[in-house]
Image (cartoon, rainbow, N blue to C red):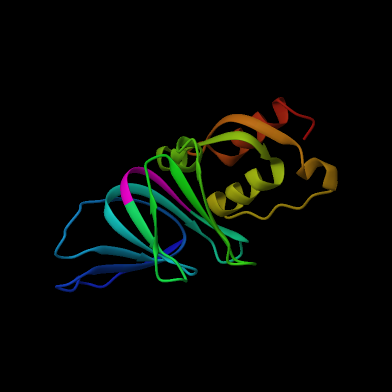
Amino acid sequence: SAIKYPVRFGANERVIQISGEAYFEIKYDSQRPFIVQAPDYNVKVLGTKFNINAYSNERISTTTLVSGSVAIPTASGSETLLSPGEQMKFSKTDKAVSVEKVDVELYTSWIDNNLRIEQMSLEDIFTILMRRYDINVYYVNDITKAEKFSGKIPLNDNLRVVLEQISKVSDV
């Protein structure tokens, strides 16, 4: 993940750029709105806690609101407002936007060095682990990629511990 921000914010707004994933807790300031520029859309922060997942190599970018409020400008010039517990998904392939209620812990548990998962494929788990531990993963069997897991994985442990936990509960 990467975040670009100025040495000093301007007098009228606070703007940062992100690629990858980041969690924010932003204080509302009506005089200087906070704007997060993701590769595919901007998020105007209205005093809130939220997570953005905007990796350039993923088909979907998401913004998940924990508390407060955010506004996301749409192509038509209007704004999509999120309420706490909602997630906006942006499809890069067809530019479609959808909003749904989610369990925010599934998208923010990583900030506490845990990965809480609910029916997540092994391929998706290893995508996260590859980013976290800077590793490459190769599959001998494509069927294994689709195996689903639920639970909590501690991310601050040694990678070997994480891999042993996965192998204990599966044939992987």
Task: Give the residue displayed 59% in from the left and 58% down from the top.
Answer: 60
Q: Is residue 141 magenta?
A: no
What residue span does the magenta drawing correspond to? Answer: 63-69
Q: Is residue 10 above or below residue 148?
A: below
Location of residue 14 by image quarter: bottom left
The quadrant the C terminus occupies is top right
Task: Give the residue displayed 49% in from the left and 35% down from the top.
Answer: 103
Location of residue 104 by image quarter: top left
Task: Give the residue displayed 16% in from the left and 60% down from the top.
Answer: 30
Residue extending farthest to the top is 169
Task: Give the residue displayed 23% in from the left and 63% down from the top.
Answer: 33
Left or right of 116 in this view: 46: left
Left or right of 27 in this view: 65: right
Q: Position of residue 94 (x, y in %)?
A: 63, 67
Pick the front one: 132 or 12: 12
Q: Position of residue 153 (x, y in %)?
A: 55, 33
Q: Position of residue 99 (x, y in %)?
A: 50, 49
Q: Position of residue 161 (x, y in %)?
A: 60, 33
Callout count = 0
